[in-house]
Image: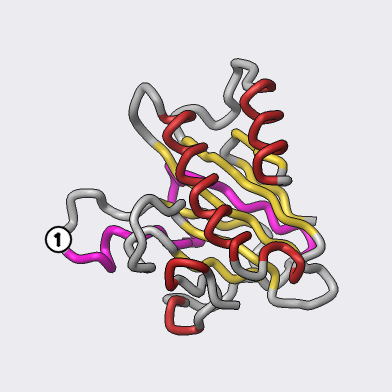
Amino acid sequence: MTQAGGGDFFDPKLRVEDPRTESLFGINDGDPDAKSQEQRRAYTLSEGDGWNACVHNKHHAQLQFTPLDHNVPLDGLCDGILYTCEEYTDLLIFIELKSRGKRWIQEGIEQLKKTISIYQAGEGCRSFNECKAYLCNNRHPHFQFSQKEAMQRFKHETSMRLHIERDIQIG
């Protein structure tokens, strides 16, 4: 699945960790002040608090997280993708993690749209039964203000549903 612009989001070389099957795990953004790209990219973890995103994996599906930002040589990508490894579940989620900034929603939406556009220029979501996007912020885990218009515009432009919340529900 080669993407336009030279990025293959499913290249095994981009996988920096093993798939997870836990019922609950977190995804954190890397250290923005780190000198190395490896320390700046997003990662998953089983323990701790203050996660940028919480993955609730009800049926213990085998999930692969692949960081994109600071891992794929393209600027402005979302933090990563999470997808099921089993063919019968076929789920792909684009994830952008935020923890600061006044314009975090607008900036996050733009990063998600850019990444999805690159992906759709290649094979697109034909390989998956379900594709979604999550914009997660640990400072606003259950965002209280309506973003209905932005979410509808996102769906119209990308054909994907946008969730603005910290909890990612699988299954």
Quadrant containing the C terminus is: bottom right
Q: Residue 164's x, y, as percent?
A: 60, 34
Rendering quarter of residue 81 = bottom right
In the displayed image of the protein, which residue is found farthest to the bottom? 12
Q: Residue 114's x, y, as percent?
A: 49, 49
Q: Residue at x 81, y 68 (%)?
A: 89
Q: Is residue 22 magenta?
A: no
Q: Residue at x 60, y 35 (%)?
A: 165
Q: Residue 55's x, y, as percent?
A: 62, 53
| Part of the protein shown in magenta | 36-59
Q: Is residue 153 left or right of residue 102?
A: right
Residue 15, compared with residue 155, is above or below; it is below
In the displayed image of the protein, which residue is found farthest to the right? 88
In the displayed image of the protein, which residue is found farthest to the left? 35
Q: Residue at x 62, y 21 (%)?
A: 147
Mark 1 highlights which residue? 35
Other-residue count near label 1 (Cα within 10 Å), few / some / many at <14 / 14–19 / ≥20: few
Q: Is residue 166 left or right of residue 67?
A: right
Q: Disc 1 residue type? A: Lys
